[in-house]
Image: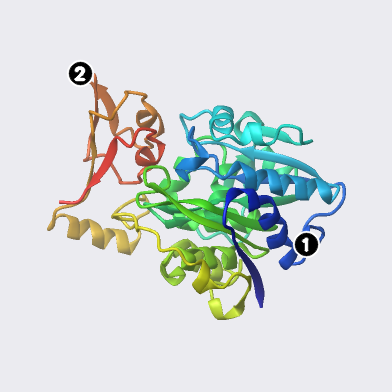
Amino acid sequence: MQYVSIIKIKNDNEIEKAVEHAIKLIGGINKFIKKGEKVLIKPNVCSEKKFTTGITTHPKVIRAVVKQVLKAGAKPIVGESSIIGHSTMKSFEISGIKDALKGLKVKIIDLNTLKSRRVKIPNAIRKKEITVSEGAVKVDRIISIPVLKTHMKTLVSLSLKNMKGIEYGREKTNNHMAGLEETIVDLNKRFKPDLSIISGIIGHQGNGPTNGKPIKANLIIAGRDPVAVDTVGTILMGFNPKKVKHIKLAAEQGLGTNDIHKIKILGTSLNTAKTNFIKPISYRLPLGTKIKTLRNIIRKVLRKRMPEPYIAFDHDKCRLCLHCKKICPVKAIKLQNKKMKVDNKKCVLCLCCHEACPYNAIKVIHP
């Protein structure tokens, strides 16, 4: 039986106590962290956005977790590497996290400024080796603090998906192409969080992870098993975790349980905490991978017989920041006559550009 705590708050002044209580319900911080250990606290700070958008982890949640780690006598490090084209340190600043951590004995680091490390993945599904930041290797414990939010490709982006932030540089887009869900699971086989705490104070719904809308859920969700935590988070968003591929794969690979009957809920009940999120317009698009599986070969045949989704730019919103061009793994985007253009024959619908765009200027069109 896995234990997952849910705490619903009334206002932001209760955040610190809610985080402390959520951890206490599942055994207390000393159950997960020991004195003297180096602890990587991995929030979701994927882009240069304020926490009020629901795109980045709430600063008060991170502060509360840092204080818990310090209380255990450990050494906290808050680390992240933002989406390609975005400044991680600027993201820490704009999100409010840098200010929130003032006065605390904690390091804030851009994981991409450290050395890279090629690590082997035991019993890999897709990638036998993955390049990560040395910052994730030279620690004793990892705490994942994602936002409760949706994702255009994976439906939800929670504890397991949040670990992609330790991937180094272009490895993020490489793994999008190699098979996003499979490589999320491979990554967690080597770097499974020791503790997962979902920041559901302000969530992100619709076309996440960066171009949806904020939703006030006022929740803290915590547990040792990231698969169980993500299962509970998915249910609280109004979705079926059995239909989320990377959560299902993670359970099948022995990383945890996605069976709600094997998860004991502590604190607020599921029914009381549930907040139905708006679903992304499409989180399962065809050929978002280079891998020639039978499933994708069938899709390719079908695409010739029916209209297919495609990427388009809203030029009124576009500010020519070129984030989309920089991140595109197949070089399908270019600047032409002072406008961004996409070659939809090259585009594989990985949606990296959609995720990187800070102005919501990229749309997925469904004919």
Residue 362 image position (x, y, % from top left): 29, 38
296, 364: nearer the viewer? 364
Label 1, label 2: how many angstroms apart (C-alpha)?
59 Å
**The residue under label 1 is which amino acid type?**
Gly
Q: Is residue 296 above or below residue 48?
A: below
Q: Which residue is mark 2?
A: 337
Residue for point 21% across, 50% down: 309
Query: What residue did someone put label 1 on?
Result: 28
Q: Going 73% across and 45% down the picture, which residue do you hit?
A: 66
Is residue 115 in view? Answer: no
Looking at the picture, how far across and down is residue 93, in whole percent? 58, 29
Q: Which secondary structure lies at badge 2? A: loop
Q: Residue furthest top?
A: 337
In the image, is 289 to the left or to the right of 85? left
Outermost residue to the bottom: 261
Q: State the residue in front, 150 or 343.
A: 150
- Please report the residue visible at 33 percent of the width from the left and 55 percent of the height from the top: 280
